[in-house]
Structure formats: C-alpha cells, structure tokens
Image (cartoon, rainbow, N blue to C red):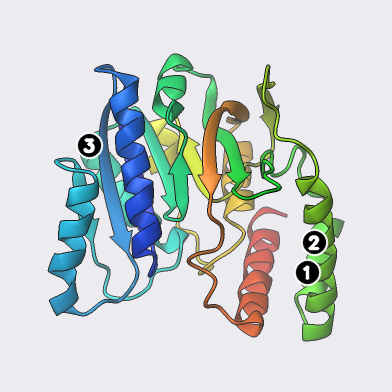
Amino acid sequence: MNVLFCIVSYRTDEALTKYLHSIRAAADASGPGVTLHALVIDNSERRESERPAFVTGVEAALPSCTEVVFPRANLGYFGALSIAQQAAARRRPEVVIFSNADLQLAGDFLEQLYGRLPTDAAVVAPAIIVAGEHAFDQNPKLVERYPRKRLRVQQIAYSNRLAFFGYNLLGFLKERLRSREAVPAADPVTRQIYAGHGALFIFTKLDFFLGLPAYRPFLYGEELFIAEEARRKSELTRYVPHLRVFDMRHASTAGLGSERRRRLMKESVDYILQCYY
C-alpha cells in the first residue's frame, strides 16, 4: 500500500512534529507492506531565513519521505488542494490522506487501513476522536445530505454577529451532550455516510481525488464539498471507526477572530448553495 499524506500546516509547528512522529510510529507498526510519503504545505508565510530550520525539523520527525512546499501566501485549507493533486499525479499513490496538522494517528492506523483495502468507497472517514477527558468521535459528520432549508438557516445565522453567536452557542451545547457519549471500544460498525469530518480525509480512488475541482472558499465547508463531489460522481463515502485519529482541535484556526470566522463560514455556505443546490 502506497500512501501519500498531504498535510496543511499554519503556524502549528509543534503539533505538526507530533503528527509526523505518529505517522512514523504507525508506519513502523504496519510492517513492510506500507510505503509512505508526506507532503507538508506550510501556509505560515515564514521568512526565507526561517525555512531551513523548519525543513530540518520536519525531516527529523519523518526521515527520508517528506517534502515541504512554501506557498507565496496563506492558501487556506483546501486552497492547497491543487499542490496536493500535483504531488499525487507524480507519485500515483493508492491512498491519499489530506489533513490538518493538529492530529495524531493511532499506532495501528496504517495497519488497519492496509487490511481494509481495496474498498468500494472513494472516501473513507475514520474515527476522529477529540482528545481530552470527555473524548468523543466527531464522525460520522453527516449521515444524510442537508436539505436546502438547513443550509439557508446557516446562511442567515452567519449573516450577523448576534445570530452567529446564538447558533454557535447551540452548537457548543450539542457538542457537550455528544461528548458524554462514550467512544465505542469494541465491535464498531462500518457504514455508508454522506460526509466525513474535515480534519482528515482518506481518498482511496486516485482518479476521484485528482478530479476534484478547485474549492474557492478560504476555510470551512470542505466536508460538504467532498460529499457533494462524491454524490455528483456516484461515489461512496464510508465511515470506518476502526481507523482512529486523535484531534488536538483548532490549532490552525485559534487565531481567527469571531468576526472573521463568521464571514468565512458565510462565504462557504454561499458557495455550497450556489454550486450544489
């Protein structure tokens, strides 16, 4: 199994190092059947003089198989998609994993993935477990497609500060309730879903990944974008909770102010409605 990790990092050097160490540990545990390469797309807009030390740190965390790209400007999350597609077109991996940097893989992640290929799904959604005292799985993100009315409600909620605050408060309370549910420890169920959580996507059909169009929004809405492209091309998305990823959460977006997050979320919903509904 040839795997390409495409990791988008924005001022998350410490988290990125831990993520790369976890990839290395998972690769060591998986045995000789797994070959991997990692592409780090650094959106941090760091000075030229700072880049060599960053590259040295990345290569030390995951030796011999890591490439680093420094875009001229911060591309956002899926703004880096075209760079990842170019790398995938060159290397022709069996699996492309596109993710944030503030994650860590379970030690058996690659072993579990290797044992579940080939699959009929173009997109695989792992268990993305929020780390902490009340750990919970953020997948499946959506089991069924949002109706247009639900997205219109989001569009209205993101249109002004007061509505945005209220909508986020409801989301926070919902998450607190979900965090009280235990993460399944035994006999988890694999099943077809509509959309996986956007922290990490596993693409198991290279042609589908390479055929993804550009996604214009800077941040947010990536889950719906991938789900709609899969739906448009009659491809499946499958939730596989045996694949475990631990999410340190929002390391890249922590510096965004509330007003900028509101505007970015509004732009993403506008885009999804315009393109797919």
> Residue 216: in sight, yes or no?
yes
Disc on res. 91:
3
Outermost residue, front side? 133
SS for tag 3? helix
Q: Earlier in the sequence, mark 3 or mark 1?
A: 3
Q: Are marks 3 and 1 in contact (CB under 8 Å)?
A: no
Q: Quadrant of residue 256?
A: bottom right
Instruction: Give x and y (percent) for residue 42.
Output: 31, 64
Q: x, y percentage for residue 115?
A: 44, 15
- Residue at figure coordinates x 34%, y 63% from the top left: 13
- Looking at the image, which residue is at 56% across and 46% down? 226
- The tag on residue 171 is 2
* Dot in front, 3 or 2: 2
Disc 3 crowd, CA 10 A, few/some/many (<14, 14-19, 20+): few
- What kind of residue is marked 3? Arg
In the figure, 88 relative to 45: above or below? above
Q: Position of residue 61 (x, y in %)?
A: 24, 48
In front of the other: 231 or 51: 51
Q: Name the residue rendered at 63%, 45% in the picture.
A: 228
Q: Is residue 84 above or below residue 208?
A: below
State which tag comes first along the sequence, 3 or 2: 3
Q: Residues within 10 Å of mark 1 (few under 14, many from 20)?
A: some
Cα distance between the residues tagged 3 and 1: 41 Å
Q: Quadrant of the N terminus?
A: top left
Quadrant of the image occupied by residue 265:
bottom right
Looking at the image, is mark 3 or mark 1 nearer the viewer? 1
Q: Which mark is residue 168?
A: 1
Type of the residue with mark 2 = Gly
Label 1 amino acid? Asn
SS at mark 2 in the image: helix
Q: Is mark 2 in CB contact (under 8 Å) with mark 1?
A: yes
